Amino acid sequence: MVLFWLRCADAWRAVLAYRLRAVFCSLSVALGVGAISIIVAATEGAYKQAYDMVDRFGPDAMLIFGESEEARATGRREKNITLEDVEALRQAFPTAYLVVPMSSRWDMIVAYRNRKHQTRLTGTTADYSRSWSWPVTEGRDLTEQDVKGLRNVALIGRTIVQELFPDEDPIGKSIFVRNVAVQVVGVLEERGSTGPGHNLDDRIVMPITTAMKKILNEKDRVQAVRMRFVDATRMEHFEAEVRAFLRKRHGLQERQPDDFRIVSPKEIIKFLVALTGSLVVFIGITGLLSLVVAGFVLANLFLLSVNERTPEIGIRRSVGARRRDILAQFLLEAVTLTAIGGILGFGIGVLGGPFLKHVADFPMHFSWKAFAVGMMMATLVGVIFGMQPARKAAAVHPIDAVRKGS
Amino acid sequence: MTMNLCVLEDIRKTYILGDVRVDVLRGVSLTIESGEFTAIMGPSGSGKTTLMNILGCLDVPTQGRYILAGKDVTHMSDDELSRMRSEYIGFIFQSFHLLPYATALENVLLPTLYLDRRMDGRKRRAMELLALVGLEDRAGFKPSQLSGGQQQRVAIARALMNGPRLILADEPTGALDSATAKDIMTLLSDLNAQGTTVVVVTHDPEVAGYARRIVRVRDGIVVEDAQTASKTTERQAHGVVLA
């Protein structure tokens, strides 16, 4: 064990002695490892974000929009789901513990005294906060009485609190939504954003009845329905059943496409992973290529080094080093350099990651896993590309190496 | 008690260079006892360097038998030869051959990296050896910061590190001025006086003069093998005069 550390110290001295070799080898490995740790971080980040979103969305939840794929693609507004549909779903699916209709508009002006703010209005039922696992932190939640009685009450998000009530307690205050006076009864927990322009806290939530009748001028059409099921493991099955049920209710023929759209957790994951996939492939190929280039740089510099250090090899052999000791020494030097390159590369990744995030709004998650993968690649490069020069060094014959005058 | 440290029996070494067959050693038999101070002399091309390589287990004979410290090394593998060098032999070269990037102390410690047995207090021992060659205050110096004579002293300390039975010196003073050469040879004589077997390969009669036995090699065979009056005694006589 003592011997091992002494040999490491020995290799370390050689690494330090040949500085130019050290700088080029470790830098070239660093670039490759940097790219690779960014990939691993991006992949992990994407999955983490996907699962975070699913978590927020609810792993047992699905969202049914009242517009067809076609309408969504062309930007046409459709509302094909009625309050009757919602009631029918509630009756037909006892396995769904929540069936919550929603109607929303994003361009709603809310005002309190002389302050104004444009926000998203969501009309929904008493179960909104529960259906999105989104707790009310101040005041109270919406109740069934609020919905049945078309009461002018609202829950507001954090952003609205900041905009309208910078230094006041909002609970019990009256605000204007369009021209309707509404009383603030509760504040939703801070949620943050899911991307630019998607500030979840910028919203006001009211009973769907009040919103449809008094503000949106809508008779019975809702924008979306959110359902949560007791058994999260059978979501695919439930999705198929809901689809069949709605198609039948809407009288769609075999050939006709759905006039609604179902979003499930699986779909969210698929979308995010696909988004990440292309970038991962691109950086992945770049990273692997630069690692191979780094490997060739290392192999060449080490071959030069072996030639230059032939006398040294002879000395070591003459004092008792076996061929495998020489091989081990040069491999140790190579791996030391690539490991340094690996650490540098991870540093480059961690520093460069936020830049990429800035440019492409890409989720990054640097973990020990990214570090471990990077270090493993670096070590592999050291062993694979250091092997040939190390073999050459080991094959040096001591009597050639210690010739007089050399 | 004397014992036969090196026994060479009819050693032949032949190199084939393309179509040309070169007989470098043509039947050398030689016995070196423990405690001897032997000089191997001969003009260049005489085969003396090849003889030294074989004595030092750096090379193996084409024919014949070599027994070192009671072990037949003739058919040993490369690893086994390395082990013999590590355990029994200390080399001193004409151009010192220190690692340029390591300090004097680290150079002296180098042989312990390849030692097949435990060694406790290796650093202390290395410092003692540096003190023995008069360089205890230069332990942290790199070879480039040392004079030629000092570098050769470090090389001698390195040769002694694993406690060898045989010191093999190949033209140890070839790169030194005569005054420094004298110091180095005196040091080797002192080591020999303390019991280490020393073999010097040289073409310089001045150097050979320190030995008590001179083996002359020419055209691959031993042409003369003679005991001489060692310069050690002469030197002591000189010392008296100079004092």
Image (spheres, grey):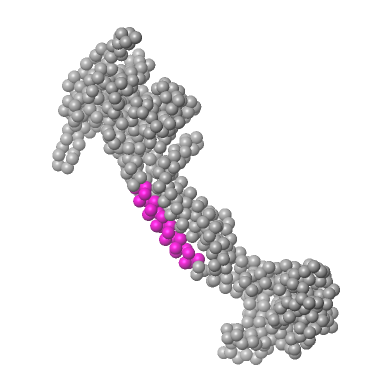
Magenta stretch: give its range. A280-303
Magenta stretch, main secondary structure, is helix
**Quick check: A278 above or below B17?**
below
**Quick check: A163 above or below A391?**
below
The residue sitting at 81% across, 71% down in the picture is: A170
| x and y percentages locating residue A84 in the rendered image | 74, 87
- Residue A138 visible somewhere in the drawing: yes
The residue sitting at 64% across, 87% down in the picture is: A77
| x and y percentages locating residue A258 in the rendered image | 61, 86
- Residue B88 visible somewhere in the drawing: no
| x and y percentages locating residue A404 in the rendered image | 27, 33
Tally the numbered discs.
0
The residue sitting at 48% across, 28% down in the picture is: B123
Horizontal side of residue B233 vs B133, given as left or right: left
Quadrant assignment for the C terminus of chain A? top left
Residue A291 belongs to the span the image colors magenta = yes
Front position in the image: B236 or A285: B236
The residue sitting at 17% across, 33% down in the picture is: B23
**Quick check: A195 above or below A81?**
above
Q: Quadrant of residue A171?
A: bottom right
Residue A285 belongs to the span the image colors magenta = yes
Please identify the residue farthest to the front as the structure is shown: A114
Q: Quadrant of residue A269?
A: bottom right
